Amino acid sequence: MTGVTDQTGVLALLGAMDVEVAAIRAAIAQPRKLQVLGCDITTGTLDGHPVMLAESGIGKVNAALTTAAMAQAGASSLVFVGVAGAVAPGIKVGDAVVATSLVQHDVDITAFGHAPGVISGVLAGGVAGAALSDALASAASSIGATVYRGVVASGDQFVTSAERSAAIAAQFDAIAVEMEGAAVAQVCTRLGLPFAVLRWISDTADSQADTDFGQFVHKIADLDLAVVKQFLG
Ligand code: SAH
C-alpha cells in the first residue's frame, strides 16, 4: 500500500490514447459509464480501490477538458499514464519518466518580454504532487523500469527532430516531450487536484520517432496496468 490512495478518495486514471488505457479499463470491476462535459468516464474499482478512468484523446485541449470532467465527476487525485519522447541524453526507449513539473513548450509570448512557457507571470503547466509522484516512481521501479524524474514539456506537435528536441530540452530543462501533460497539470493546479504523470519512453523525439513509436506503443497497455496495480498497492 502506497499510502497516497486514501480509502475514501477516487483516483482518476487518464491516458490520451486507447492503447494507454485499454488494459486498465478491462481490469475495472463493476464498471459504470458516465458522461461529463462530453467526456466518457468509466468508474468502478481496481483491486478493491475506487477509481475512474478516461481516454482524453491526443493534445492539450482534449487533455484539459477530460481533466476538468474527471474533477467534476469527483476525482480526489489524478494519475496520467502514457508515452513520450525522450529529449535528454541517456534516456532510452522503454525507460519511464515521472514528471516533477510540466510546461507547455509551445506557449510563446516572448515578444512582450515574458519567459518562454509563461503567461501573465505564471508557468503554463504545474508542479506534480510529490507524494503521488514518489509512489508512481516506486511503482515503476518495482516492475523493473529504469525511472527518470524531471521536467516534462508538452505541446501540440509530435516532435520528430533532434534539433527541436535539443531546443526544448535546453529551454525548459526538460527530459521528455509529449502532447498532454502540461494541460493536465495546469487544470489540476487551478482546481487544487493533486496529480502525477508517468510516461514510458516510446521514442527519442528525432527523425526515427514515428517508427520507434509504432514499434513500442503496443507494449503500453500492459505496462500501464502493471504500474497502476503496483501504485494502488
Ligand atoms: N498514432 C496517433 C498519433 C500519436 S501522437 C494517431 O495516428 O492518431 C503521439 C502521442 O504519444 C501523444 O499522445 C503524445 O503525448 C505522445 N508522444 C510520444 N512521443 C512523442 C513525441 N516524440 N512528441 C510528442 N508527443 C509524443
Image (cartoon, grey):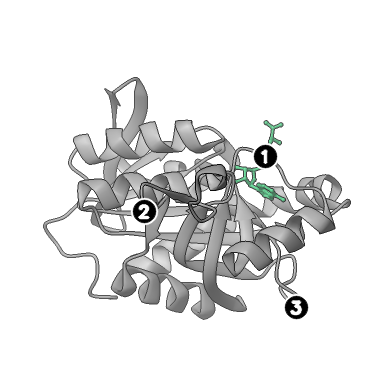
Question: Label 2: how many residues lie within 10 Å, few (<14), some (14-19) or many (20+)?
Answer: few
Residue at figure coordinates x 34%, y 40% from the top left: 67
Cα separation, mark 3 vs mark 2, equals 33 Å
Disc sitting over residue 121 in the figure: 2
- Mark 1 to mark 3: distance in Å? 23 Å
In the rendered image, the quadrant that contains the N terminus is bottom left
Q: Specify the farthest residue to the front.
A: 112
Give residue 90's mark.
3
Q: Is 186 on the left-hand or right-hand side of 154?
A: left
| Viewer-nearest residue: 1 or 159 | 159
Task: Residue type at mark 3: give it.
Answer: Gly
Q: Quadrant of the C terminus?
A: bottom left
Q: Does the residue labelled 1 lie within 8 Å of ligand 1?
A: yes
Dividing the image into four equal quarters, which quarter contains ligand 1?
A: top right
| CB within 8 Å, label 2 to label 1 | no
The location of residue 97, given as percent across then percent down, is 57, 68
Q: Where is residue 48 in the image (x, y as percent from the top left)?
A: 24, 57
Query: Which percent across, then down, holds residue 150?
Result: 53, 72
Q: Earlier in the sequence, mark 1 or mark 3?
A: 3
Please name whichever residue, 88 or 198, is drawn nearer the observer in this view of the structure: 88
Rendered residue at 63%/63% (across/down): 171
- Does dot 2 land on a helix, a strand or a loop? loop
